[in-house]
Image: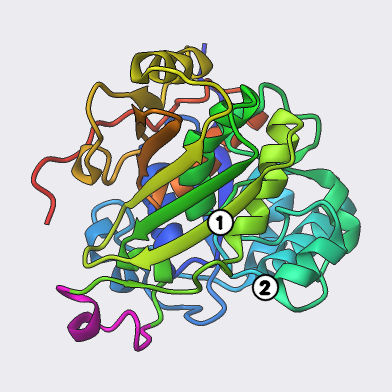
Amino acid sequence: MNAAAPIPTIVLGGSGYVAGEFLRLLAAHPHLALGGVVSTSQPGEAVANAFPHLKPAYPATRFVSLDAVVERLGTAPRWLVLSAAPHGASARLVDRLLTAGEAAGVELVVVDASADFRFADPAAYAAVYGHAHEAPARLEEFTCAVPEHLERIETPHAAHPGCFATTMLLGLVPLAALGLADEFYVSAVTGSTGAGRTPRDTTHHPLRHSNLFAYQALKHRHAPEVRALTLAATGRDVALKFVPHSGPYSRGIHATIFLEAKERLTAAQVNDALREYYRGATFVRVEDEPPKLKDIAATNYAALHAAVDGDTIVVCSVSDNLLKGAAGGSLQWANRLLGFPESTGLTAPAAGWLG
């Protein structure tokens, strides 16, 4: 019996770092195949020019316009759309594709790695991002969550939380679910790829290298996202004080989560509670020692460890911002929505000795 044909997949925002990871993952996925990679800034340009490391997988592939992929929709009955487009732009592109798919009688499954479908309320989105949502009628079609925090999804499409949010939520949600605290404090450091591909003063190598600095302290847009998703996952409305930092390396997030617990627990009890919460979760490990970024860099795995001193609990959470925090976590959702095992195409171990 012939195997089912791979599902054609459209990647939006194709020239960015997250899109590059989508393309890399698609090249090794047994049930998906690239059906078009859209770039509004580089249509017609070779994908290998933007991502030389992907040339073996895509030697002749070129970026295309949205119009070009819309014209292709009738060639297959079912498509996957993975959006790595910037917030604001993503909603417009996704809405156009969904409208075209509806007109053509074609099923589209969308997973959005941008911020555009993370808030169910368009007013909440506007309050955080400073502009009206571009496709508010589509919001009810999306569910946003860390895959490990939602057993079932009832909507046809999914949105993935941000990279900082994902790393924080992995350590914070299990403790909030236990009711251990109503207020959490987080200090987190991200690599330079978290700032995107377009260079700025804060991402320019001479300023970033051998340097460490905080930014948007207590004002980062992922804080309200974490609060909303913690409430959705646990039913508890927690307070969050979050200070992000830019680190002198390319990929990975290290978050340190602090809380004053309502009841006194040992470190062993907290780590056991984390292990129980993530029992059966392929991509979340609870370690015996504080995890290191290089343990998970360039993988879809995350690692946690808790320490305790009196009433104070500290959880260290690490994940790769481009994979577990974006493309890899999004592919977990895609696998689930399409009926594949969640870990399909995502279980490769870390590469050693990354620079």
- 113 in relation to 231, above or below: below
In the figure, is residue 191 to the left or right of 183? left
Q: Does the stretch in magenta take in 350? A: no
Q: Which residues make up the magenta segment? A: 199-210
Residue 304 in the image, given as x and y percentages of width and height: 36, 31
Q: Residues within 10 Å of mark 2 (few under 14, many from 20)?
A: some
Callout 2 amino acid? Ala
Judged from this view, the residue extending furthest toward the left is 353
Question: Which residue carries the number 1 mark?
Answer: 241
Front residue of 273 and 267: 267
Tag on residue 117? none
Q: Residue at the location (71% across, 69% down)?
A: 128
Callout 1 amino acid? Lys
- Quarter of the image with the C terminus is bottom left
Give the SS element for disc 2: helix
Q: Residue at the location (34% across, 88% down)?
A: 201
Residue 169 in the image, given as x and y percentages of width and height: 54, 40
CA separation, marks 1 and 2?
29 Å
Of marks 1 and 2, the one in the foreground: 1
